[in-house]
Image: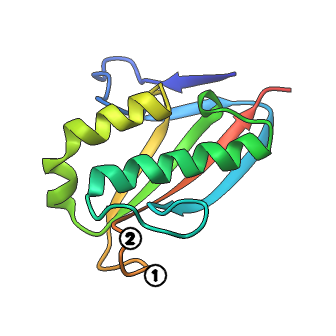
Amino acid sequence: MHTPLLPSGWPRPKGYANGVSATGRQVFVAGMIGWDGQGVFHSDVLAEQVRQALENVVAVLHEAGARPQHIVRMTWYLTNKRDYLAQAPAIGKAFKEVIGHFDIAMTAIEVSALIEDRAQVEIEVTAVVPQ
């Protein structure tokens, strides 16, 4: 179980948590990008790559006996901040459908490039599975 942290008097952040407290077995997921399990990109649209990257995260979590509700931290590396902001509604929809909750400490960083040339987003995750 994890608990979002919201200091007294602070407004609730939209789409993430300021911090999370959790106890249990930790699971660390390497940066997942928007290609499928065979390393094939099916889209160059950021929101679609985000959906695929999140589905990849869920697949790796599954291997550890974890589920999306165990995610406590995410770091997003994006190649274009403006695309992210412009596609925010579609990205939020994908996030809600694949992950399902927003009580996750998150950071998003714009980077000049990712190792895979077609990748527009890379998402790494920490999850904590209650014992």
- Residue pictured at 29% horizontal, 42% vertical: 91
Which residue corresponds to the image point at 48% horizontal and 34% vertical from the top-left? 98
In the picture, measured across the screen, residue 89 lies left or right of residue 78, that is left
Between 32 and 41, the one lying in front of the other is: 41
Relative to 36, does residue 15 appear above or below in the rendering? Answer: above
Count of labels in the image = 2
Q: Which mark is residue 15?
A: none
Residue at the top extreme, as displayed = 9
x 48%, y 39%: residue: 105
For disc 2, the neighbor class at 10 Å (few under 14, some 14 to 19, many from 20) is many
The spot of residue 36 in percent (x, y) is 53, 60
Marks 1 & 2, CB-CB < 8 Å contact: yes
Q: Residues within 10 Å of mark 1 (few under 14, many from 20)?
A: few
Secondary structure of the residue carrying numbered label 1? loop
> Which residue was labeled with disc 2?
119
- Residue type for callout 2: Ala
- Where is 38 relative to 13, above or below? below
Residue, disc 1: 115
Question: Separation of disc 1 and disc 2 at Cα?
Answer: 8 Å
SS of the residue at dot 2?
Answer: loop
Where on the picture, by quarter, is residue 78? bottom left
Nearer to the camera, 32 or 10: 32
- Taking 105 as reference, is 125 left or right? right
Q: Could you say which is closer to the camera, residue 44 or residue 29?
A: 44
Residue 130, above or below 80: above
Most foreground residue, 112 or 9: 112
Amino acid type, callout 1:
Ile
Of the 4 image quadrants, the one containing the C terminus is top right
Q: Give the percent coordinates (x, y) of residue 49.
A: 37, 56
